[in-house]
Image (cartoon, rainbow, N blue to C red):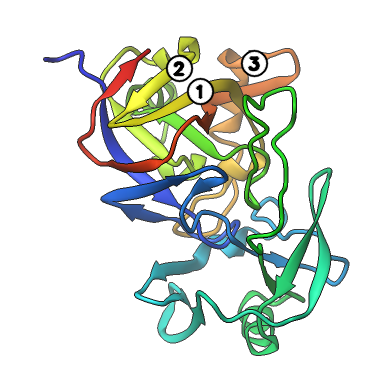
Amino acid sequence: MSDSLIIQDLYVYPIKSLAGIRLHEAKVEGRGFEFDRRWMLIDENGQFLSQRTFPQMALLKVEIGRDALKVFHQASPEDFIEIPFEEDSQEILSVTVWDDDMDATLVNSRFDTWFSQVLGLSARLVKMPHATNRKVDPRYAINEESVSFADGMPYLLIGQNSLENLNSRLDYPVLMDRFRPNIVFSGGEAFAEDSWKKIKIGKVDFQVVKPCARCVMITVEQNTGKKGAEPLKTLAGYRKVGNKIMFGQNMVALSTGVIKVGDEIKLV
């Protein structure tokens, strides 16, 4: 059926603002996919580090192993670190993501040294403990959901045809990785997701709660770490609502489970 809505890609970003990982299936949890933005780099003041300011972060690639994350610079994959899933120090500190302050654990100073050297800036690696309960903005929460170190919402959904619509307006097409979605689907009209309220993927229910406002981060080419004016400039010409530029839809999960590439999206 040509108008079927099918999951095309699933992504997680284990360390906030570093490269994402494409998955065949993903475990849906309340605060986001398993592994998604559970780690983060911070500066000496506890503020999160981002490609917005340090676009070279895009060049650090991440892989999920059996019991550890593997991180390396794309130019020198032989120089890597492995970050055990369970290796947390006992040192807890307050960190900040936008307007939210929360507790995080420092992982290990040897990783801080590696990240600082590779990125050319002062960086410390922290992890979100299970006990940290960072609430979704109550304006958009359904059941007092929590969120990881993501900017504000647990899930981001984008239609492939929405990207095709944007690319038809650009001199140089961009890849979906600019937009850091969790779920990409094929089928439907461009921006069909804008009108959705509740969807089911496999056996998991999601509530579509708001459009995703975009910023200069989408101007970072993910394989070079270079910034340009696009696609933000073109999006501003036809996807502006008030003073915000919208692309993609944020969601919360209403249930848990596993979703897979090839699953159908059903509107509820």
Q: Which residue is mark 2?
A: 198
Q: For the residue labelled by badge 1, is the local secondary structure a helix, a strand or a loop? A: strand
Q: Nearer the viewer, residue 213 or 146?
A: 146
Decide if residue 74 is on the left or right side of residue 188.
right
Q: Is there any visible trace of residue 179 in the rendered image?
A: yes
Label 3: which residue? 240
The residue wearing badge 1 is 207
Residue furthest left in the image: 1
Q: Give how far apart the Cα atoms at labels 2 and 1 are.
A: 5 Å
226 left or right, relative to 137: left
Point 27% across, 31% down: residue? 202
Please, what is the three-letter code of the amino acid marked with disc 2?
Answer: Lys
Task: Say which label, 2 or 1, has the lower sequence index.
Answer: 2
In percent of width and height, residue 61 lies at 45, 67
Q: Residue at x 39, y 20 (%)?
A: 199
**Chain-order first, disc 3 or disc 1:** 1
Q: Is residue 107 toward the left or the right of residue 169 in the image?
A: right
Tag 2–tag 1 contact (CB < 8 Å): yes
Residue 44 figure quarter: bottom right
Secondary structure of the residue carrying numbered label 2:
strand
